[in-house]
Amino acid sequence: MPRTKKREMRSPDKSHYFIDGTVGRSGTLGLVAYPNALKGTDTEFTTFYMTNIKRWGHQTCNFDGRSTTGTLEDGRGSWWVLGKRGEVMEMPAVGENVQSQITDAGTGRGRYGYVNKIANIAGSLYVCGYARQVYRREVGAWVHVDQGMIADVNATGISLESIDGLDESNMYAVGLKGEIWHFDGRTWTPVDSPTNVHLFEVHCVNAELVYACGKDGVVVRGSGSRWEVLQNPDFNQDLWGVCAFEGEIYVAGFGGLARVDGTDIVPLDTGLGRKIPGYRLRAGPPGVLWSIGNDDILRFDGSKWEEVICPDNK
């Protein structure tokens, strides 16, 4: 009799790719991720990882997560995960998870489209997205704070990709086609942007210095009405993350990591033996800069880069 081949048992693919991250006050890293096994399907799902490097935990959400941040109220912390259709999941350190819905966000009649970013600005939560929609969380409700800026529900090609600020009277939002908007606590004002390329993230360093990064390796910096463009023709892949860390400005994109040095953008050698694509950058305690790439997570303590591997990606 012919021998039958023993069938190989393959382990299910548990690996994930990473979409966003945030750092808690204790230094714990929170990560929004999507299972690689679900790529190419219509399944909307999010795995939210939490790690202090030594230990990993996770929770799941039945929506497509796009952004995350954290808050601290009455001494208790919460993670917040934003879904593209306006779902918001609060994951408190104590108690049950609470999911809310931004009524006007998402797809369908009378809705403004997907949302992209959730940010904690001076203790308040803000969300921005397509058609220049911006919301603030007030007493458990999500309230429009985009008067004079928001586009028609049927508008196309208009989107705010990122929002940041020092306080509620000095905020910036950036988006497609180089749009930059400033909020003084009452009114949104369009900034005469020095570029028309898409801007994907904004970071406010102080009242006089704001950075944004975007398509083709473009970095813009300034404040108020004064802005300039920085660009390295040899480092021209899209940039998705910008962050201040220990007095330096770092940017990240699919072409790798770089540092802003005066008017130059200088690619970084992480010392890990290969070029590692980046995506988002987040700084937090205890004096650590995180690079959150779709496939690679790096930790920088100011002197050395090290790779951090999610257990499900081993």
Image: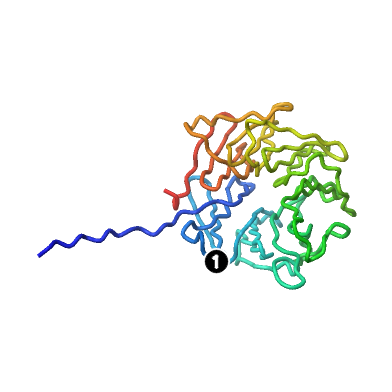
* Residue 127, percent from left and from top: 74, 57
State the residue at coordinates (53%, 57%). Answer: 34
| Frontmost residue, 262 versus 120 | 262
Name the kind of residue labelled 1 in the image.
Asp
Query: What colour scheme has been applied to the protein in the rendered image?
Result: rainbow
Quarter in which the N terminus is drawn: bottom left
* Residue 201, percent from left and from top: 70, 46
Residue 276 visible somewhere in the drawing = yes
* Residue 69, percent from left and from top: 66, 53
Residue 207 in the figure: left or right of residue 249: right
Which residue is situated farthest in the bottom direction here? 109
Q: Name the residue under label 1.
A: 42
Q: In this view, does 162 lie above or below 247?
A: below
Q: Is residue 236 above or below residue 126?
A: above
Q: In this view, does 66 lie above or below 203?
A: below
Residue 82 in the figure: left or right of residue 53: right
State the residue at coordinates (74%, 44%). Answer: 197
